[in-house]
Image (cartoon, rainbow, N blue to C red):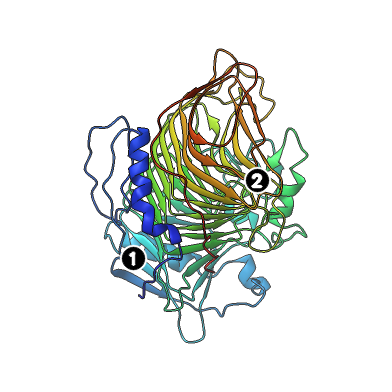
């Protein structure tokens, strides 16, 4: 395998970003790195369950190679026989079953002129890695019946349940389900920088229909009681110490990667590409998950690039997102579900390209730094820091919104402790910031340090704001502003990374 250096100009000052995190008082920051599949993580005493000391992973040895038997189609479509019964499902799953617990990889390899695999949903077990070689593509089935969860709404239709909920309480199982500790999904890199690719084919018609997964999602947009029953591309079901490394994901029918609880997750060098018109295709959703690191990655998607969430079943915390570039996203977000509580989340040294996605599609919701929730699923958000962030072409530069939807529940959101230290925006031809608490009893607790925005329009209410070296002037109902000494500096944001390709 040939490794290459990623294109982030911020790498040179990434250590400074972490120093700034320490200065703003975040209780737990994950070191830059990850845990290789099969490795053990030692617990330490912190305000989160435990923190990991992690380093860049390595690809494990091969337990069993699985050679490709299909040529890669130019239009993502295979023969009708192959589409009706994806031919690679049983042999990939058999290899995964036999390699469980070995700490090694089931390696999908090219063979002669063949470099494609077509499969129904797969399960990755404890102590193993699914490895996709550079130049190889693993295609997901288009048949909704392959994903059907027994007793749930019909996959591939509009159902009564919300496809964004946790677990399997939706009509569709994910394409790749990680169901054991110390497992991983990885790719190799070619000398040109291409990576192994997983294609969810959300842009293709569901088998037996004239509607794509994405069109189904769009048709649900105006519905109030029904949601699309679409599969996620990857779901980690409560597993600990999961690693994703140098793998590319594209055309997900819904969320790309959902972390359904679990402790210890690392994504390093992951590339995600879904166009802006692919609704609800979040990049990463750590949901009631702890000790999460997402770093050195590139995310272009049709919804939130990152959305750190928690449900009533438990908190989310110890999450770090660093040295990552985003395009066309709805936000580098915390929320909207915060009911279980969210604490100790750090975004450090990241870039947000607003305005359009990498395909030239205009962003339907053009947001940068974002915390969102409402009274249907609100909870306490504390120890959340956005450090050394660069934004270009973003409309909603800072969006702290506890009235995200018209919730009428009793789970009131409280954004108790949010810090933005080091934020610069450029090329904002129009834009604004929103700094809001829920009400006088639940004010926003916000620290703004080293914030230089090229559009300074701001709306604020019910907020206690500490400020240092920042060029916006928030005021409004229930707003207090206090000057503080501050630490750190404004990032230069003199250049932005380019999209590296898949």
- Disc 2 marks which residue? 229
Q: Residue at x 55, y 65 (%)?
A: 499
Q: Secondary structure at mark 2?
A: loop
Decide if residue 256 is on the left or right side of residue 219: left
Looking at the image, is 253 positioned above or below residue 413? below
The extreme bottom residue here reads 112
Q: Residue furthest top?
A: 441
Q: Give the alpha-carbon distance from disc 1 to disc 2, as whole Å.
A: 31 Å
Q: Is residue 167 visible?
A: no
195 with respect to 354 (left or right): left
Badge 2: residue crowd in 10 Å (few <14, some 14–19, many ≥20): many
Q: How many numbered circles does the render carry?
A: 2
Mark 1 closeness class: few <14, some 14–19, many ≥20 residues within 10 Å = many
The quarter in which the N terminus is drawn is bottom left
Residue situated in front as seen by the camera: 26 or 308: 26
Describe residue 353's horizontal placement relative to residue 43 as left or right: right
First of labels 1, 2 by sequence position? 1
Considering depth in this image, is 46 or 337 the residue closer to the camera? 46
Residue that numbered label 1 is attached to: 105
Residue 143 is situated, as x and y percent measured from the top left of the image, at: 64, 59
Residue 435 versus residue 149: which sits nearer the camera? 435
Residue for point 64% across, 66% down: 84
Determine if residue 248 is in view: yes
C-beta proximity under 8 Å, tags 1 and 2:
no
Where in the figure is residue 64, as x and y percent of width and height?
33, 71
Rendering coords of residue 95 (x, y %): 38, 66
The answer to which of 416 and 123 lies nearer the viewer is: 416
Q: Position of residue 455 (x, y in %)?
A: 65, 42
Kindly state the secondary structure of the residue where label 1 is placed: strand
């Amino acid at each position: 395998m040939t490794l290459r250096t990623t294109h982030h100009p911020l790498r040179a000052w990434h250590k400074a970003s972490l120093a700034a995190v320490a200065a703003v008082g975040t209780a737990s920051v994950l070191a830059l790195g990850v845990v290789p599949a099969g490795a053990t993580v030692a617990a330490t005493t912190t305000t989160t369950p435990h923190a990991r000391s992690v380093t860049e992973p390595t690809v494990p040895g091969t337990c069993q190679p699985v050679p490709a038997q299909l040529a890669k189609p130019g239009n993502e479509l295979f023969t009708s026989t192959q589409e009706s019964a994806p031919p690679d499902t049983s042999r990939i799953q058999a290899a995964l079953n036999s390699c469980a617990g070995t700490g090694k990889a089931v390696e999908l390899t090219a063979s002669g002129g063949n470099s494609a695999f077509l499969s129904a949903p797969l399960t990755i077990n404890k102590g193993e890695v699914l490895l996709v070689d550079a130049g190889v593509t693993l295609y997901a089935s288009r048949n909704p019946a392959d994903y059907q969860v027994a007793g749930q709404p019909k996959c591939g239709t509009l159902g009564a349940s919300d496809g964004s909920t946790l677990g399997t309480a939706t009509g569709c199982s994910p394409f790749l389900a990680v169901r054991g500790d110390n497992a991983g999904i990885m790719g190799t890199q070619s000398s040109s920088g291409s990576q192994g690719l997983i294609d969810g084919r959300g842009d293709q018609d569901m088998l037996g229909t004239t509607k794509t997964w994405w069109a189904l999602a769009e048709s649900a947009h105006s519905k109030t009681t029904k949601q699309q029953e679409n599969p996620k591309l990857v779901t980690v079901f409560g597993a600990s110490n999961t690693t994703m490394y140098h793998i590319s994901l594209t055309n997900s029918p819904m969320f790309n990667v959902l972390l359904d609880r679990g402790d210890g997750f690392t994504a390093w060098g992951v590339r995600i590409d879904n166009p802006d018109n692919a609704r609800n295709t979040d990049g990463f959703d750590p949901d009631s998950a702890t000790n999460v690191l997402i770093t050195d990655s590139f995310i272009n998607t049709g919804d939130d690039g990152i959305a750190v969430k928690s449900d009533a079943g438990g908190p989310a915390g110890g999450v770090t997102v660093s040295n990552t570039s985003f395009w066309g996203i709805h936000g580098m977000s915390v929320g909207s579900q915060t009911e279980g509580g969210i604490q100790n989340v750090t975004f450090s040294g990241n870039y947000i390209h607003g305005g359009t996605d990498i395909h030239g599609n205009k962003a339907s919701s053009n947001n940068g730094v974002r915390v969102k929730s409402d009274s249907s699923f609100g909870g306490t958000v504390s120890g959340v820091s956005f450090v050394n962030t660069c934004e270009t072409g973003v409309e909603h530069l800072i969006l702290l919104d506890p009235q995200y939807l018209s919730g009428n529940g009793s789970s009131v959101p409280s954004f108790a402790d949010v810090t933005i230290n080091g934020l610069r925006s450029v090329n904002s031809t129009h834009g604004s910031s929103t700094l809001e608490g829920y009400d006088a009893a639940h004010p926003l607790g916000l620290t703004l340090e080293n914030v230089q925005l090229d559009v300074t329009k701001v709306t604020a209410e019910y907020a206690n704001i500490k400020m240092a070296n920042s060029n916006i002037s928030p005021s409004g109902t229930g707003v207090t502003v206090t000057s503080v000494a501050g630490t750190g500096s404004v990032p230069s944001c003199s250049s932005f990374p380019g999209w590296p390709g898949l």
